[in-house]
Image (cartoon, rainbow, N blue to C red):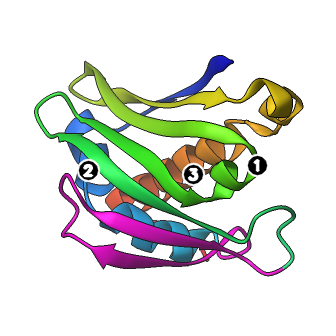
Amino acid sequence: MKGSLFHELEVGLPASEVWEVYGTLRLAQLVVELLPHVIQKVDVIEGDGGVGTVLKVTFAPGTPGVQFYKEKFVKVDNEKRVKEVLVVEGGFLDLGFRSVLFRLENIEKDSNSSFIKSTIEYEIDEEHAANASLVTTAFLATMAETISKYLTEKKTGVMNS
């Protein structure tokens, strides 16, 4: 069984500014810094943020379900502002999923605004089909909103803790 979900957020920032975070390892650093109640740490296992980079994402203590997963960057297109990340160990794979791919896109609307589009594509074995309901864009939406707020506040010089 295959499926996909996506979330799109319009932000008052140029796509190039958003991509400076989304297209780099800075995204992982900011997620740990800004969302510590969700992600405890992100370790770079190999790579520098380009294709082939492998990260180990560890969830905060008390997070229900799996405690970690490893992901591999399979596409980083700085021109089109698209990053594709494949789960290679743990996470959804421990729940009967054959594959899980996250696609992060920064789509330019005009010179001062853009969209952050986050997509999850998955394939799951029929006997675990009920677990497909666990797939949600909630974290990707929270991440997009949090990063957008952070970048906007940084740009305007208004930083709240």
Mark 3 surroundings: few (<14), some (14-19) or many (≥20) residues within 10 A: some
Residue that label 2 marks = 23
Type of amino acid at the residue the image marks with label 3:
Met
Residue that label 3 marks = 143
Report the mark closest to the observer, 1 or 2: 1
Give the magenta-colored segment's residue range.
Answer: 36-61
Please tell me which residue is depicted at 19% across the width and 52% down the height of the picture.
Answer: 51
**Disc 2 on helix, strand or loop?**
loop
Please tell me which residue is depicted at 48% across the width and 72% down the height of the picture.
Answer: 56
Residue that label 1 marks = 95
Q: Is residue 57 left or right of residue 68?
A: left
Residue 147, placed above or below residue 54: above
Locate residue 63, reporting x and y percent.
Answer: 82, 69
Please tell me which residue is depicted at 58% across the width and 24% down the height of the picture.
Answer: 6
Is 72 magenta? The answer is: no
Type of amino acid at the residue the image marks with label 2:
Gly
Type of amino acid at the residue the image marks with label 1:
Leu
